[in-house]
Amino acid sequence: MALERLDKILSGTGRWSRREVKDLVKAGRVTADGAVVARPEDKFDREAVELRVDGEAVDGERYCYLMLHKPGGVLSATEDPKQPTVLDLLPPHLRRVGLFPVGRLDKDTEGLLLLTNDGPLGHRLLAPKKHVDKVYFVRVEGRLDQEDRRAFRTGMVLGDGLRCLPAELEVLEPPDTGLVTLREGKYHQVKRMLASRGKPVTYLKRLSMGPLRLDPELAPGAWRPLTQGERQELERLR
Ligand code: URA
């Protein structure tokens, strides 16, 4: 396995910038196999070395996991010739580590988006068999009611024949708002389900995905690395 610079390995986790890694090393807070690392440019085999920051293992961190509050107006894609993508919201060093969005949100949809380069985990989160719940806040034209709720529960069949799994709809106040819980993620699904009830969606925001909840401290367009607790919750889905 090729040797890589410490600052590249640590900043690639999304938890520290290169500048921060430099400061951590200078302060003697980084160890490699028990020895304090002297320079951020020192090289290691990331597969073999045991790195610690402040004594906490940076567990092999081959992968990067970021929570993004996707704003409206950007694509859930890794590149696009004309339009901004979610990767454009990240600093340059994190645009080069192979991150991809786990499950797409429409361009105008806001909210929780997990970005990772952990392919196997991404696929598991999206696998229909895993039934990872996704919760959306929704606003519609018109009023949501108990008939809509029953239709969602029964498992709707959309105009094009798409059969949806039973889903939850909680009507909120004011009644043009609600919470939708889906166990699958078909194209434009929330919008299509509500359109078929004659209540077009005017605003959509994802609040959670499995164990991950959108951090209320994250403004639209902001991101942060997942906490260790959040990463452990995701591990349980493996
Ligand atoms: N359902 C939709 O219609 N759009 C999204 O972005 C996500 C779920």
Image (cartoon, grey):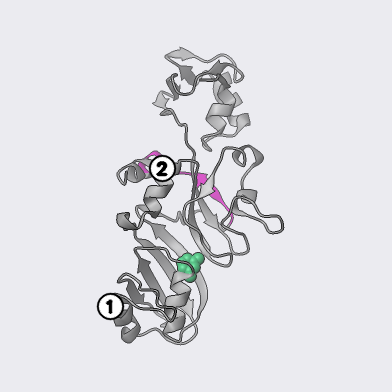
Name the foreground residue: 117 vs 219: 117
Amino acid type shown at disc 1 = Thr
Which of the 4 image quadrants contains residue 232?
Answer: top left
Tell me whether circle 2 and circle 1 mark residues in contact (CB < 8 Å).
Answer: no
The residue beneath circle 2 is 120
Based on the displayed image, in which of its 4 quarters is residue 121 positioned? top left
Q: Earlier in the sequence, mark 2 or mark 1?
A: 2
Q: For this rendering, which residue is in front, 56 or 234?
A: 234
The residue that appears at 57% across and 22% down in the rendered structure is 4
Q: Is residue 61 left or right of residue 9?
A: left
Residue 132, how many percent across, how many down?
34, 57
x, y percent for residue 52: 44, 23
Instruction: Check disc 1: other Cα within 10 Å, few if <14, some if 14-19, many if 20+.
Output: some
Left or right: residue 159 compared with residue 39 = left
Which residue type does callout 2 highlight? Answer: Pro
* SS at circle 2: helix
- Location of residue 122 with respect to 11 vertically, above or below: below
Q: Residue at x 40, y 27 (%)?
A: 56
Rendered position, 17 above or below 152: above
**Which mark, residue 154?**
1
Q: Residue furthest right?
A: 82
Which residue range is magenta in the image?
221-229
Q: Let me know if residue 238 is in the magenta part.
A: no
Residue occupying the point 50% across, 84% down: 141
Give whichever of 7, 153 is nearer the camera.
153
- Give how far across and how far down residue 2 sits, in percent: 55, 20
